[in-house]
Image: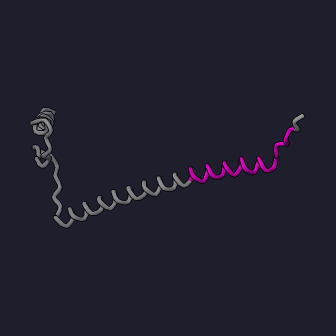
Amino acid sequence: MEGSVNVTNAVLDKKMDRYGFEEKNFVAESEITVTITLDEYRDLVRKCARSDYEIEKANKDKYERDSENKRLKEEVEALRVKIYALQNPVEELPFS
């Protein structure tokens, strides 16, 4: 138990070394690491970028469809009002 506490403390000490610490390429004692090739790394970055692009594209498409739906709903409501007005004309009251 004491060994894991020391590892945790070592990791925390390294992460909290200074405010705004951005470097994350350290390995603490008994920490599990994975080594990948440059080609695997590039493929991973490419897939991540593609996913971000697809998400952005889907959000843009959703926004455009929502805008079109709103415009069509307003048009439908205006046509309903017009149909109602044509089916139920207001009779003019004669002025005496």
* Magenta run includes residue 71: yes
Q: Residue 83 in the image: state x and y as whole percent.
A: 75, 51
Q: Which sits in the foreground, 48 or 36?
A: 48
* Residue at figure coordinates x 42%, y 54% from the top left: 59
What colour-coding does the image apply?
one colour
Q: Residue at x 20, y 62 (%)?
A: 41
Q: Which residues are magenta?
A: 69-93
> What is the quadrant of residue 11 in the picture?
top left
25 lies above or below 38 = above
Q: Residue furthest bottom?
A: 39
Of helix, strand and loop, which mostly describes the magenta segment? helix
Q: Position of residue 67 (x, y in %)?
A: 52, 52
- Residue at 69 percent of width and 52 percent of height: 79
Image side of residue 40 versus residue 53, left or right: left
Q: Position of residue 57 (x, y in %)?
A: 40, 59
Residue at image position (79%, 50%) is 86
Outermost residue, front direction?
96
How many marks the image carries: the answer is: 0
**Residue 5 is covered by the magenta coloring:** no
Percent of width and height locating residue 1: 16, 33
Q: Nearer the viewer, residue 60 or 58?
A: 60
Q: Relative to 76, is 9 on the left or the right?
A: left
Considering the image in quadrants, where does the C terminus appear?
top right
| In-front residue for pair 31/94 | 94
